[in-house]
Image (cartoon, rainbow, N blue to C red):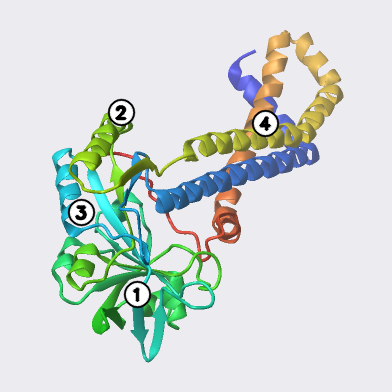
Amino acid sequence: MPIWGMVLSALAEIRVGKVRVALSAFCVVCLVATVTLVVALASLSQQAAQQYFEEQGGRPGTYEMYLSNGEGRNGPAPIPAGTIDTVRQDLKRYRITGAIESFSRNAKIRHQGQILTTAEQNGPPAFMLMAVDSELGSIRALKLVAGRWLTRTDDLRMEPQLVVSKGFAVRLGLTPATAVGTELELASQEVWVRSRIVGVLDIGSEDPNYGQPPQVYLPYAVSARWGISGDETKFYLRMPPTEAKPAIAQLKNDGRLTWNVKEVGIQRAYQSFDGISSKLKLVMLAAALAILMVGSLPALVLGIFAVRQRRSEFGVHRCFGATGSDLFLIVLLEALIVCTVSGVIGVALAYVAQAKVSARVLPRITDRGGPPGSFHIDTSF
């Protein structure tokens, strides 16, 4: 039996069995749309989780290096500026990308008469002040909702440029869009210095009373110039995993010999997302297979019923010389035509529904507040 004859026979059966074909097509549309939507949402959730991990700990190949001089009278002893310069020179000599993050426990910000401090007497701090290098934005994949991140040019400005979290903007009574360009006053040794917000980060929660305290970042060079001391100092390092072990050993050796610090601790900042990612993929695959198996049962039952009802028709075909393989191909072509058309419709419906569903589901999955953004993951060195 020629192939064109099989195609015509399949189309004729589709035209005759309209009710059965419509039910089968409906099952396939629902099945394909559901599987496509589940896979799309799982992929977006995985990407959002990876973005969150990279914001908090850094991209793959990121390490945290802690420097400690022991405990002083009022907390951790500060790291001398000469030590910081020596560490920077060594990192540059070893061609390791590094960025400092120095956390201050005693800082104040004033805005329209309202004074916020990092050392509240009763309750959590109003904000956290971190003096950082501009390279931190690329190492930790920080995502902005408004404005820009710090640049090396900001290190030379007399007026401190600040990047704040969403919660800090809300605490000032501002939205992320209106916070950019807002002037603040930063306390430096009891002297108030005018500063300006240049960016708002999509980190933490928009509710300043929920989760981690609001955060404020300023250039480390500016903080050193204005005498804003850091109580805890660490470096974020990014290097290829194959070169990490000898580099860590060399840095710890330099810490003992030339850095003049009591302790140097280095650990991976990007710990476990590879394992979580593989588990998420397995869960996604299992869910898709389960939906396919359960959802295909109605279409399979309808197909078996149609074959049983067409016994006499198949007998006529056999009388005119059709073989068993020809009859099988006729049934297969009919199913292929119906499934192809229904699958295209299902994918189109899933594409339309994905944007609306993801806008509702993703914020609950990631628990980060705000609408989901388009994430760009860069794991290259």
- CB under 8 Å between discs 4 and 2: no
Can you tell which of label 4 and label 3 is closer to the viewer?
3
- CB under 8 Å between discs 3 and 1: no
50 or 358: nearer the eye? 50
Q: Earlier in the sequence, mark 1 or mark 4?
A: 4
Query: Which residue is under mark 2?
Result: 242
Task: Determine whether, in the image, residue 58 is placed left or right of residue 154.
Answer: right
Which kind of residue does numbered mark 1 sit on? Ala
Residue 193 placement (x, y as % from top left): 23, 82
- CB under 8 Å between discs 3 and 2: no
Can you tell which of label 3 and label 2 is closer to the viewer?
3
Can you tell which of label 1 and label 2 is closer to the viewer?
1
Q: Secondary structure at mark 4?
A: helix
Q: Could you give the CA–CA distance between mark 1 and mark 2, rounded to whole angstroms?
A: 40 Å
Q: Secondary structure at mark 3?
A: helix
- CB under 8 Å between discs 4 and 3: no
Q: Could you give the CA–CA distance between mark 3 and mark 1, rounded to whole angstroms?
A: 21 Å
Query: Which residue is under mark 4?
Result: 11
Residue 142 placement (x, y as % from top left): 36, 57
